[in-house]
């Protein structure tokens, strides 16, 4: 049986004796809903809901707020756009994901998105290709976040002819110092890449400023 989630935050529903009135794109329609004392169990624990799940046309509909909160996610409703948000109201990936931020001298660096792991650690993810005959170390300089100077953690060694997947780590304790508590509050970052020969620190390259908006 298929399962769908019924948005109950900001979405009103009128019950009737033989069914339920559902709100469609630009109007309403009456449907025959089946109530059968449906229970919701998340990770072995039964979830109490103020609105009972129901079955319509072979699909089980569940209250999205109860399910989202049982999974530890915030649930909100945007009446202006008729959108239910589970978790953040903003994607963790920038609209500029997969943006090539440097491609020269046999070296290519691509920004692939902003990520947040289960511990809340935030990384600006990079794919780095070293197509030269030398080993290089990649770091960042002149880093700013929301136009505030910031010290991230990043250093990546890539040997000749290899690729690396790494991330510029934004420590939560440092973010808190500038009034940022979550990834959704990050609006933009700017930095330059500092690239140098890992063997003797020669052949240094300092790229033009990179800007990424979220």
Image (cartoon, rainbow, N blue to C red):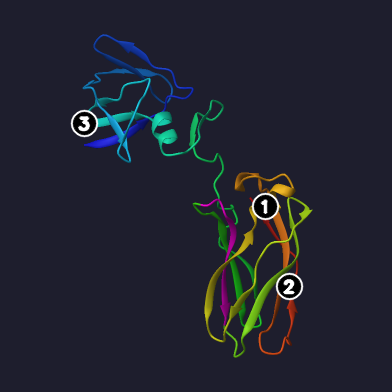
Residue 190 lies, in percent from the top left, at: 73, 59
What residue is disc 2 on? Answer: 207
Specify whether 48 is left or right of 38: right
Quadrant in which residue 132 is drawn: bottom right
Q: Main secondary structure of the magenta part?
A: strand
Segment tinted magenta in the rendering? 119-130
Quadrant in which residue 43 is drawn: top left
15 above or below 47?
A: above
Q: CA distance from mark 3 to mark 1?
A: 49 Å
Quadrant in which residue 4 is drawn: top left
Residue 200 lies, in percent from the top left, at: 71, 90
Query: Of label 2 and label 3, which has the lower sequence position?
Result: 3
Q: Which one is nearer the viewer's eye here, 110 or 26?
A: 110
Residue 213 lies, in percent from the top left, at: 66, 53
Specify whether 102 is left or right of 61: right
What residue is disc 1 on? Answer: 173
Instruction: Give me the residue at 56% from left, 68% from top.
Output: 166
Answer yes or no: do the residues labelled 2 and 3 have beta carbons within 8 Å? no
Q: Which one is nearer the viewer's eye here, 26 or 37?
A: 37
Specify whether 199 is left or right of 10: right
Q: Tell whether position 122 is magenta.
A: yes
């Amino acid at each position: 049986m298929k399962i769908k989630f019924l948005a109950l935050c900001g979405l009103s529903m009128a019950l009737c004796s033989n069914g339920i009135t559902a709100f469609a794109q630009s109007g309403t329609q009456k449907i025959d809903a089946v109530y059968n004392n449906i229970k919701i169990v998340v990770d072995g624990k039964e979830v109490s809901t103020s609105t009972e799940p129901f079955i319509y046309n072979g699909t089980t509909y569940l209250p999205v707020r109860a399910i989202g909160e049982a999974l530890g996610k915030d649930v909100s409703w945007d009446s202006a756009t008729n959108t239910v948000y589970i978790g953040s109201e903003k994607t963790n990936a920038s609209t500029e994901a997969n943006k090539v931020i440097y491609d020269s001298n046999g070296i290519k660096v691509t920004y692939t998105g902003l990520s947040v792991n289960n511990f809340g650690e935030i990384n600006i993810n990079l794919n780095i290709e070293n197509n030269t005959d030398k080993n290089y170390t990649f770091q960042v300089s002149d880093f700013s976040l929301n136009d505030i100077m910031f010290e991230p953690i990043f250093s990546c060694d890539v040997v000749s002819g290899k690729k690396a997947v790494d991330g510029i780590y934004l420590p939560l304790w440092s973010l808190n110092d500038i009034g940022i508590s979550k990834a959704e509050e990050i609006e933009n970052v700017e930095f330059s890449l500092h690239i140098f020969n890992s063997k003797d620190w020669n052949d240094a390259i300092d790229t033009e400023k990179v800007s990424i908006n979220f």
